[in-house]
Image (tube, rainbow, N blue to C red):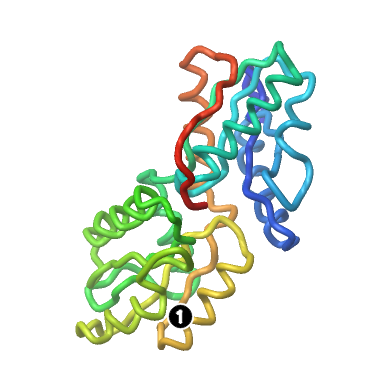
């Protein structure tokens, strides 16, 4: 496909020592490249290249936090990294997009992954939507809001749970739904890539009696479309120099 003219999209992922994570990120971004966007990958930690390195010599870029929820990494880490890049590259101007979620297309991606384990929306099936969790209450509230919205798509119920930092835990949420009378409980993994949290959630959910646990979102076409939409929307705004965001510490 012909490449869309415009500045490169610099995707900033969390990063992981788990090679499955970097492979998954690249698979997702390959879908974006196939839609004609010039994408450059970077990672905040654990894997090269860093955003600062990717932005060296670049005059203009769209920076997209490849994260599912706005919290510490998007509010503090990424602005700080971009300020470092700006000090090293005085000609740099950027447009920074929002995180991948929340977005209406996320529900399609979540249902796609559940369908892969034989689960479709049904009034006899309850879902536990599990995210990483954060010490930022606003980030956790986003997940709770997503669960409330998703409930309306034909499930017995949908409840939020968190792998760390707050409650309920995935196992507690599964048990609570069974105690409330749910005929069947499944777990939807709200993680971008495989890794520690996704593995931990799968084990805990299965031990709690979950009927099924979905794979991570990964290279879902819905996520690729969200990236493209974020990129195109950013191009409608003027570029600017990077300024740090000052705030209290929040969760990941």
Which residue in the rendered view is the most extreme toward the front? 248
Q: Judge from the rendering whether residue 238 lies leftward or rightward of residue 17; answer left or right.
A: left
Which of the pair 224/138 is nearer the observer? 138
Please count the marks in the image: 1
Question: Image point 37% across, 55% down: which residue?
Answer: 140
Quarter assignment of residue 91: top right
> Residue sitting at 45 percent across and 63 percent down?
165
Among the 4 quarters of the image, the one containing residue 240: top right
- In the picture, the quarter occupied by the N terminus is top right
Residue placed most toward the observer, 150 or 172: 172
Q: Position of residue 171 (x, y in %)?
A: 40, 80
Q: Is residue 248 left or right of residue 63?
A: left
In the image, taking residue 209 as reference, residue 218 lies left or right, namely right
Residue 16 position within the rendered picture, expressed as x and y whole percent measured from the top left: 69, 57
**205 relative position to 85: left or right:** left
Residue 237, percent from left and from top? 47, 16
Residue toward you, 241 or 18? 241
Disc 1 element: helix
> Label 1 neighbourhood size at 10 Å, few (<14), some (14-19), many (20+)?
many
Question: Residue at coordinates 49% horizontally, 31% vertically from top-left?
Answer: 246
User: Residue tagged by mark 1?
Assistant: 205
- Residue at image location 43% in from the left, 59% down from the top: 110
Picture coordinates of residue 98, whole percent (x, y): 47, 35
Vertical comparison of 180 with 39: above or below: below
Vertical arrangement, residue 247 with respect to residue 202, above or below:
above
Residue nearest the observer in this picture, 186 or 130: 130
């Amino acid at each position: 496909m012909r490449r869309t003219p415009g500045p490169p999209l610099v995707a900033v992922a969390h990063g992981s020592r788990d090679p499955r994570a970097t492979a998954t990120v690249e698979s997702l971004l390959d879908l974006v490249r196939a839609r004609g966007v010039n994408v450059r990958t970077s990672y905040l930690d654990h894997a090269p290249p860093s955003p600062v390195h990717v932005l060296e010599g670049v005059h203009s870029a769209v920076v997209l936090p490849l994260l599912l929820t706005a919290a510490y990494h998007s509010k503090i880490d990424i602005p700080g990294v971009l300020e470092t890049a700006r000090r090293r590259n005085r000609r740099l101007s950027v447009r920074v997009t929002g995180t991948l979620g929340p977005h209406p297309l996320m529900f399609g991606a979540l249902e796609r992954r559940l369908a892969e384990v034989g689960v479709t929306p049904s009034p006899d099936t309850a879902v536990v939507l599990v995210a990483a969790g954060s010490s930022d209450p606003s980030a956790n509230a986003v997940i709770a809001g997503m669960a409330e919205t998703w409930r309306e798509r034909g499930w017995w119920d949908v409840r939020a749970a968190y792998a760390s930092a707050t409650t309920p835990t995935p196992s507690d949420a599964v048990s609570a739904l069974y105690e409330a009378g749910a005929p069947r409980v499944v777990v939807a993994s709200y993680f971008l890539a495989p890794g520690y949290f996704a593995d931990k959630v799968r084990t805990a959910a299965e031990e709690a009696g979950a009927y099924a646990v979905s794979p991570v979102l990964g290279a879902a076409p819905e996520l690729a479309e969200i990236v493209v939409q974020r990129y195109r929307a950013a191009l409608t705004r003027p570029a600017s120099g990077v300024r740090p965001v000052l705030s209290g510490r929040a969760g990941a």
